[in-house]
Amino acid sequence: MNFIPYLQLNGTARDAIGFYEKVFDAENLGVLTFGDMPASPESPFPEDAKNLVAHGAIKVGGSMIMLSDTFPGQPAQEGNMVIICITFDDADKAHQVFEALQDGGQVEMPITDTGFSPAFGVIKDKFGVTFQFYTEGYQG
């Protein structure tokens, strides 16, 4: 059994995939648009939906994140329904990635040494996705 975070975005999935590829050195596993899918004569896709991402996936280390855009008229709501916890074994790398995610994002808790992690922090990126940083190896 695997747990894979699936992010639904309001028309920004393609941008998010490109951004996460850079920030996390992720591998793009492919993107399928609504326009790539077989059309149904009973319910054709609106023109403004054809270039939206119906399904995309990236590989980050040994993990995967799946993403899609919502269908027009069915917007996703930003919030704290999905939080992705990123674990590190290197505090310097945690700081580097945290810094990169600040591009257009909002720091909810600055990355800092805590009593349980040498580099812990929380940030909401420019797509409204919240990431919690946890670094192992606290030497206290």
Image: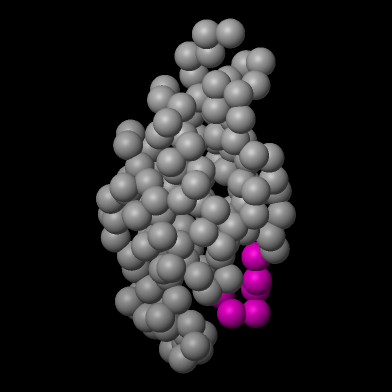
- The answer to whether residue 33 shows anywhere in this view is yes
Residue closest to the eye, 102 or 50:
102
Residue numbers of the magenta segment: 71-76
- The answer to whether residue 2 shows anywhere in this view is no
Residue 8 rendering spot, x and y as whole percentages: 55, 60
Is the residue 111 above or below the residue 140 in the image? below
Residue closest to the eye, 39 or 64:
64
In which image quadrant can residue 29 be found? bottom left
Determine the residue positioned at 46% across, 91% down: 47
Residue 138 rendering spot, x and y as whole percentages: 53, 13
Residue 98 rendering spot, x and y as whole percentages: 51, 43
Quarter the C terminus occupies: top right
Quarter the N terminus occupies: top left
Is the residue 90 above or below the residue 131 in the image? above
Residue 78 counted in the magenta span: no
What colouring style does the render use?
one colour
Determine the residue positioned at 68% across, 40% down: 109
Determine the residue positioned at 40% across, 81% down: 51
Please indicate whether residue 73 sits to the left or right of residue 1 in the image: right
Please indicate whether residue 26 sits to the left or right of residue 88 in the image: left
Residue 135 rendering spot, x and y as whole percentages: 51, 24
Residue closest to the eye, 4 or 122:
122
Residue that extends furthest to the top in the rendered view of this protein:
140
Is the residue 106 above or below the residue 15 in the image? above
Q: How many marks?
A: 0
Residue 74 counted in the magenta span: yes
Overall secondary structure of the magenta section: loop
